[in-house]
Image (tube, coloured by chain):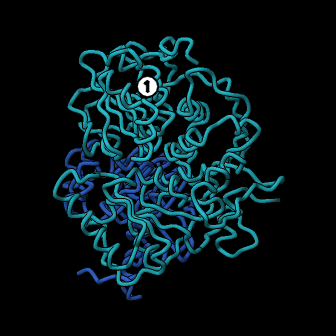
Amino acid sequence: MIRGHVWKFGANINTDVIMPGHVYDQSEAIQTKAAFAGVRPGFSDIFQAGDLIVAGTNFGTGSSRPAARSLRNLGCACLVADSINSLFFRNCVNFGLLALECEGVSALVEEGGELEIDIDNWQLREIGTGKVLPILPVPPRLLAIMRGGGIFPVLEREGLIVVQR
Amino acid sequence: MGMTIIEKILARAAGKARAVPGDILDMPVDTVVLIDTNFYPAAWRDILKVEAPERLAIIFDHRSPASDARSAAAQKVGRDFARRFGISRIHDVGRNMGIAHTVIAEQGYARPGTVLVCDDSHTCAAGALNCAARGVGEPDMIYAAATGRTWFRLAPTIRYDIVGRLGTGITAKDLFLTIADRFGEHANRNVEFGGEGLSALSIDARRTIATMASELSADFATFEPDRRMLDYVRERTQVPFEAQMPDADADYIERRTLDLSSVEPLVALPDAIIGNTVGLSKVAGEPIQQAFIGSCANGGLEDLAIAARILEGRQVAEGVRLIVTPSSQAVYREALQAGYIATLMEAGAVVTNATCGACCGAHMGVLAPGETCITASTRNFRGRMGDPTARIFMGSPAVVAASAVIGAIADPRPLLGDSQ
């Protein structure tokens, strides 16, 4: 069970917003620091590990840049959106960011509200109102990669890439 | 029910008789294309084993020639990787350089019926050649290079049946903007194009549409094979391939007709395309400081040709910078031979080497605070081409060329005269 405070974004949030182009060629730390800097300056300073991000439809549309990794590095416990762009979803799986689709979540909860997410039963609950919505189940294989820290640990175990520590 | 083009290609690759939306399909990749951004320290992992070096290609395009020490270092990592694993298909600075999606088409890397991945969201461009190609993430590229495989979650397909012909001064970019305007985003959907009007569209035009499918948020974009497409590919590769047509009873989530003769010039307003397009007359007269023709979407020979027709005997307006980036050095050479480059330069355009530079705000065309640009590139997100306060309008290369002459967003049709 995951429980956390909500930071809320709208529909069609693009990857240039999540990870600005000017940090594309920089270190992971600099990329993480710049998360949402263009639309919410200082976001990476006020976001607390364990918080949640909630958004509308088509979250993460745009480029293939590793924007999902910045959210994972911020300590985002879960991203829940009405829908997630398929390229962004791949990056969530591969970088180990728990990302779930739940139609109606953006109307269910306000910024600052709290959600309880139950992956075993694929549903979430808005703490204030007690309202419950179903979550679209993630196929077990992808969920295992997502929750196991992404694809690099898998490749490391198989001896295909050098272990990064 | 039968299968769509993408369902047939992916099912075959995954070794299955049938694939339906929702399936997770695991498969070998026919072509894995690494680009310079894959070799930055935050993206790259030291790969110990490459499953099939002959199926890899390396194309430096985002900052090429290197624009700073960081990109130079990344490209050195890429060259060393190519040498270590004997990867012969490397497109570095030189005769065969270009933007990945153009090089992929020119070199015959995108073969009909095959699977291709690259870490750039506009990889769907190769769908114009009946190839199952799409942008994936940086870790996907490491995975595909090391294991030779990838996975896809199959989405439902929207089918577009093309009829009619485009009018004078109207281009494939206007057709894409029309799709975006009429139908909005296509998130988590594949798109398929075909029909009797397809033969009226050149390969360049199809590649523009397939490339821009990324801006519809679509997954895969595929085109039906026809004689023109098959000839194009056969001129470029000796490797056998099997193109895929959709089944007559393919199961589409929706089927829509596109009448090319109904397409008018459209412009996307700054920051977004979806829900943000207007008729050209609504924004005509908006002053600009920069005009850009280039990118994987609109740096093709036809794009340079229509720009040259508009700029012939005219001058770029005072206070406007017109930057033209052919999408590959091969396109650049063809445009030189056809005289387009001389015409563009005489008019005051600056013609750069092939690079993603201006389109992604990397180099050679970065915008200053408060500036206004009209672009025929791929994307107009806020901050995309430089300062976040710059405004990026998007139109066809004809609209951009006309705007460069007038100094404000303008209709190209009066400037094309009777030359059509």
**Colour of chain A as rendered:** blue
Front-most of residues A74 and B231: B231
| Vertical placement of residue B51 versus B88, above or below | below
Front-most of residues A8 and B213: B213
Image location of residue A69, percent across then percent down? 33, 64
| Vertical placement of residue B273 versus B41, above or below | above
Q: Is residue B9 left or right of residue B376?
A: right
The furthest residue to the front? B337
Q: Residue beneath label 1, please?
A: B308
Residue drawn at (76%, 59%) of the image? B3
> Chain in cyan?
B
Image location of residue B300, percent across then percent down? 47, 39
Residue drawn at (40%, 54%) of the image? B96
Q: Is residue A116 visible?
A: no
Residue B195, located in which quarter of the rendered image?
Answer: top right
Q: Is residue B360 visible?
A: yes
Residue B111, located in which quarter of the rendered image?
Answer: bottom right
Image location of residue B337, percent across then percent down? 44, 36
Task: Give the quarter of the figure containing the N terminus of chain A.
Answer: bottom left
Image location of residue B80, percent across then percent down? 28, 73
| Vertical placement of residue B162 versus B169, above or below | below
**Chain of the residue displaying label 1:** B
Task: Give the quarter of the figure containing the C terminus of chain A.
Answer: bottom left
Secondary structure, mark 1, is helix
Residue drawn at (21%, 32%) of the image? B368
The amino acid type of the residue labelled 1 equals: Ala
Q: Is residue A47 left or right of residue B14?
A: left
| Vertical placement of residue B143 versus B94, above or below | below
